[in-house]
């Protein structure tokens, strides 16, 4: 699929790539959930593992833009707790990724996202504010986030669960998420290149054509986030997470 795509830059597959790049830019700028919803589309048109490698440079480009804009708002105490365990999750995801069926994996991810949604609702109802201080919870979230981001770039809902439980303000939430994914996505690159061989000069050439849409999406995302009041931003994240989960389950 990737080889034939270069012969027809106006193919449906290429248009899907451009749309995904736009959504990735919006997601990284704070419209979270919309980026996760593009993952099933990419998997359908390019294959599960191939789409993960194809999307990674676009995600990194969007991460850089998000960090440039929101870098002052990051909560580093939370990030340093997560990084080592997320790295372990990436290594585990690399090892087992070859043995996961795309269709079955998407169903599992949909179930995980729905579980995350249920936990978010539980935290909203019970006002649990000390969950991020629990070491076991933090370590588990780190490993799961690393695993899911490696296998399918699907750690967004997992991180939403953790960071929303920390009761971060809107911009602190976005800035912390931006730094987390920039560091972890760069960490993933050698594994995609050397072990999975899903990033090469051909995929990078496709990325070059799609990156301008990432920048446009980031600009749109910043504009949308400014329009969302602080009081409803948490529920905006929760609702887009549900849409992402439905998309994943339906496409599986």
Image (spheres, rainbow, N blue to C red):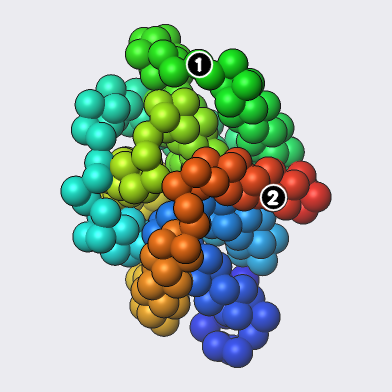
At 38% across and 72% down in the image, what residue appears? 219
Q: Does residue 74 sit above or below 189 in this rendering?
A: above
Residue 250 horizontal/vertical position (percent): 80, 50
Residue at disc 2, secondary structure: helix
Name the one closer to the observer, 200 or 46: 46
Q: Residue 128 carries which label?
A: 1
33 left or right, relative to 94 = right
Which residue is pictured at 66% across the width and 66% down the height?
45
Tag 1 secondary structure: loop
Q: Which residue is located at x 47 percent, y 26 percent? A: 165
Vertical placement of 96 versus 43: above or below? above
Query: Do the residues bearing badges 2 and 1 touch, measured as CB atoms within 8 Å?
Result: no
Q: Nearer the viewer, mark 2 or mark 1?
A: 1
The N terminus, quarter of image = bottom right
The CA distance from mark 2 to mark 1 is: 24 Å
Asked whether residue 190 is in view, the answer is no
Check the image and report above or below for 209 versus 43.
below
Residue closer to the observer: 93 or 17: 17
The residue singled out by tag 2 in the image is: 243
Image coordinates for residue 140, horizontal then vertical, percent? 45, 18
- In the image, 63: left or right of 239? left
Asked if residue 12 is positioned above or below residue 54 in the image, the reply reads below
Residue 236 appears left or right of 72: right
**If you read the primary sequence from the N terminus, does the residue marked by circle 2 or circle 1 appear first?**
1
Corner quadrant of residue 46: bottom right
The residue under the point 51% across, 31% down is 161
Residue 87 percent across, percent down from the top left: 33, 31
Which residue is nearer to you in this view: 60 or 237? 237
């Amino acid at each position: 699929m990737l080889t034939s795509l270069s012969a027809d830059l106006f193919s449906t597959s290429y248009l899907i790539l451009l749309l995904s790049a736009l959504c990735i830019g919006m997601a990284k700028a704070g419209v979270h959930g919309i980026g996760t919803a593009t993952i099933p589309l990419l998997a359908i048109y390019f294959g599960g593992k191939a789409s993960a490698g194809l999307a990674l440079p676009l995600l990194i480009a969007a991460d850089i833009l998000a960090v440039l804009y929101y870098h002052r708002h990051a909560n580093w105490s939370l990030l340093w707790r997560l990084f080592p365990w997320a790295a372990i999750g990436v290594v585990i995801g690399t090892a087992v990724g070859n043995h996961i069926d795309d269709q079955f994996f998407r169903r599992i991810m949909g179930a995980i996202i729905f579980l995350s949604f249920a936990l978010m609702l539980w935290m909203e109802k019970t006002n649990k504010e000390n969950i991020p201080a629990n070491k076991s919870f933090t370590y588990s979230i780190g490993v799961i986030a690393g695993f899911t981001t490696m296998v399918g770039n699907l750690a967004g809902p997992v991180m939403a669960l953790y960071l929303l439980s920390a009761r971060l303000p809107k911009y602190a939430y976005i800035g912390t998420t931006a730094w987390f994914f920039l560091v972890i996505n760069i960490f993933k690159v050698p594994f995609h290149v050397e072990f999975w061989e899903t990033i090469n000069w051909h995929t990078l050439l496709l990325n070059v054509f799609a990156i301008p849409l990432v920048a446009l999406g980031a600009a749109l995302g910043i504009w949308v986030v400014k329009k969302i009041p602080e009081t409803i931003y948490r529920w905006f994240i929760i609702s887009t997470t549900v849409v992402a989960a439905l998309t994943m389950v339906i496409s599986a």
